[in-house]
Amino acid sequence: SQQGEEDPQALSIQEGENATMNCSYKTSINNLQWYRQNSGRGLVHLILIRSNEREKHSGRLRVTLDTSKKSSSLLITASRAADTASYFCAGGLSYNTDKLIFGTGTRLQVFP
Amino acid sequence: DTGVSQNPRHKITKRGQNVTFRCDPISEHNRLYWYRQTLGQGPEFLTYFQNEAQLEKSRLLSDRFSAERPKGSFSTLEIQRTEQGDSAMYLCASSSGDYETQYFGPGTRLLVL
């Protein structure tokens, strides 16, 4: 079963606008990873943030993590049509396992 | 450097048949994972290996499913007596160790008729 929930489920914006996606999870994590998935394809890793980190940047991406609220957010700045995809957060659990627990995903549509 | 590869990319089979999928991880990655993804959902964990040892299996992995990684390199996932509910995308990932980035392959899309 999936323990993460993402909000919103779908988001439509114009090119150049920023897109923010939120992720909430239920159990303690060691890290949280964000992935992008284009329709019907594999997952592309975007960024990993560890439980002792609060914010991380990679290019146009900014990820925050609030372990007290069990939540994370992904911000894509200056979006492009090529950013159109589904975005998933995945928690790496902190107890004796290395599996990822994925959220339900946010479908982002960026209009040119 | 090549990423994770999976074969075949697509498989159509009839209910009751057996199917086998292969995953080749990024070279020198000792961790290998299998996930399953159904339409509109996020991936769900099935199992993972460290080298040739299978360390964890999900309850989703019924008796009809078996995964192996005999030499600690590539892995196979076999589904016996397929059912229509097995139709999904089967994703493989690899990583360099505990709590590290998991890199995913393109997936094998299975359709059971």
Image (cartoon, coloured by chain):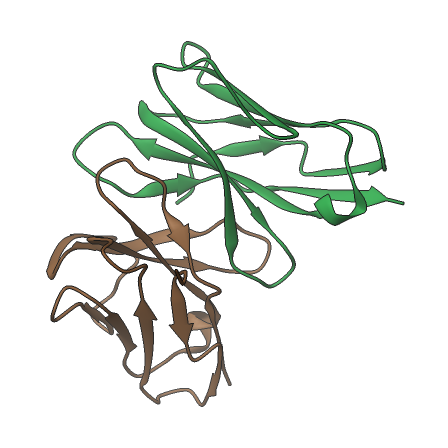
Left or right, residue B65 beside residue A39:
left
* Colour brown maps to chain: B
Q: Is residue A14 above or below residue B14?
A: above
Q: Nearer the viewer, residue B108 or B41?
A: B108
Task: Work out whether residue B59 can be spotted.
Answer: no
- Residue A58 lies left or right of residue B66; in this view the side is right
- Where residue A67 sits in the image (x, y, percent)? 41, 14
Give the left or right position of residue A79, taking residue A65 as reference: right
Residue A31 position (above or below residue B96)? above
Q: Could you tell me which quadrant the N terminus of chain B lies in?
A: bottom left
Residue A21 lies, with reference to residue B30, above or below; the image says above
Give percent across and percent down for residue A99: 29, 43
Quadrant for residue B2, please give it: bottom left
Q: Which chain is green in the picture?
A: A
Q: Residue visible at 36% across and 46% down? A: B102
Residue B24 position, x and y percent, is: 31, 68
Residue sitting at x 74%, y 49%: A82
| Foreground residue among B36 and A78 | A78
Would residue B43 appear left or right of B46 to someone viewing this image?
right
Q: Quadrant of residue A29?
A: top left
List x then y, in percent, for residue A8: 68, 32
